[in-house]
Amino acid sequence: MREGEDNRGSNTGLLRDCKVGVEAITHIVRPVALHRSECWSVGAEASVDPCAVGDIPPCRVQSSSKPVAEIPPMKPTKAPDRRNELHNRISHLELEETPPDFEAELAHQGCYMPLRLMPDRIKHDNLVMAELSESGRRHPLLSFLRVRTAQVENGRQMLASNPENELVTKFQRLNIVRLAEAAKQMRWAVGSSRKMVQAIILDIVDPLRIVDGLWTMKVTLQDESVDSFMCLVDSFTLSSLIGLTPGEAMEVRASSDVARRKDGQRRLAAVEEQLRRLDLLLEVEMFSGGRADPVIRSIKTFMQALDA
């Protein structure tokens, strides 16, 4: 009997200890469960803790079933419109009055970065509107030809309005070419052609003399393209430089007047001095295939050519 009472007392002590432990745990768990009441399922049934004893209130457990959000049906995507994308990109470009600095762009990008073919900043004048035949919509496109044409027209108007620029226009009308270019053009031509060249008379190969009643002289020309170019000087050109025809020169030579002969000698000596000038424009007649020596048909200075 005494042993049974001892066992009964020990069991009662164990139950009392369990009750105290469960009450301590319940006081800790209940505030957390009440604070997170939205996380518990409303329709779930309360389950009783098997360790609960006496008046310990039951605890709610979290429902294993979670609400699933409804997934809307997926809609088919459309292919991107490249024209609208290009229009949106160009319409958001920053427009400035100054042209883009390509050197700064290259220096900033470095050698390992791809080069942007179209800068972010472009000029207002470079934007023109072009209508597409497919959709009828208008998109801004780059047109450098329009800008270049406007610049050329403005330049022509400035040349026409300013009298000082008339000399530039006259110089352009002379159509001056180099000796090498003129000789190359005559390879594919027939007959003869006259070219205006800017060259210097490098040397006099055959001196001035009268042959068959005509003035003759052979010289070599030089310009930027040719070091030595052999040609003859026309008799009419020499007559204009001397101021005497071959017949008049023969009369002066046979004259007994000393003053007249000295004047003739000064005229002949002045020819070489005139040919040594550096501002000469020579009209050279060239023949196809090199079948004859080129002939200088006229000699003028720049001022004579521009004043004409």
Image (cartoon, rainbow, N blue to C red):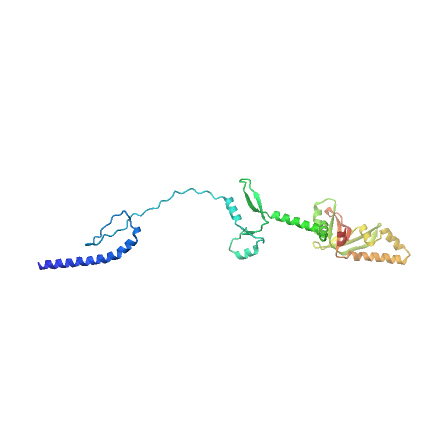
Residue 75 falls in image quadrant = top left
**In the picture shown, does residue 122 fall above or below 74?**
below
- Percent of width and height locating residue 150: 64, 48
Q: Can residue 119 be seen in this view?
A: no
Placement of the N terminus among the 4 image quadrants: bottom left
Q: Which residue is drawn at 66% across and 49% down?
A: 154
The residue lying toward the viewer, choosing from 199 and 81, is 81
The residue lying toward the viewer, choosing from 271 and 119, is 119
- Percent of width and height locating residue 164: 72, 53
103 with respect to 244 (left or right): left
Residue 209 falls in image quadrant = bottom right
Q: Residue at x 21, y 58 (%)?
A: 21
- Percent of width and height locating residue 124: 58, 50
211 with respect to 11 (left or right): right
- Count of marks overlaid on the render: 0
Q: Residue at the right extreme?
A: 256
Q: Residue at the top extreme?
A: 134
Q: Is residue 150 visible?
A: yes
The residue lying toward the viewer, choosing from 304 and 213, is 304
Residue 189 falls in image quadrant = top right
Q: Residue at x 11, y 58 (%)?
A: 5
The residue lying toward the viewer, choosing from 174 and 71, is 71
Q: Residue at the left extreme?
A: 1
88 with respect to 177 (left or right): left
Q: Which residue is drawn at 87% across and 52% down?
A: 248
- Percent of width and height locating residue 138: 55, 43
3 with respect to 197 (left or right): left
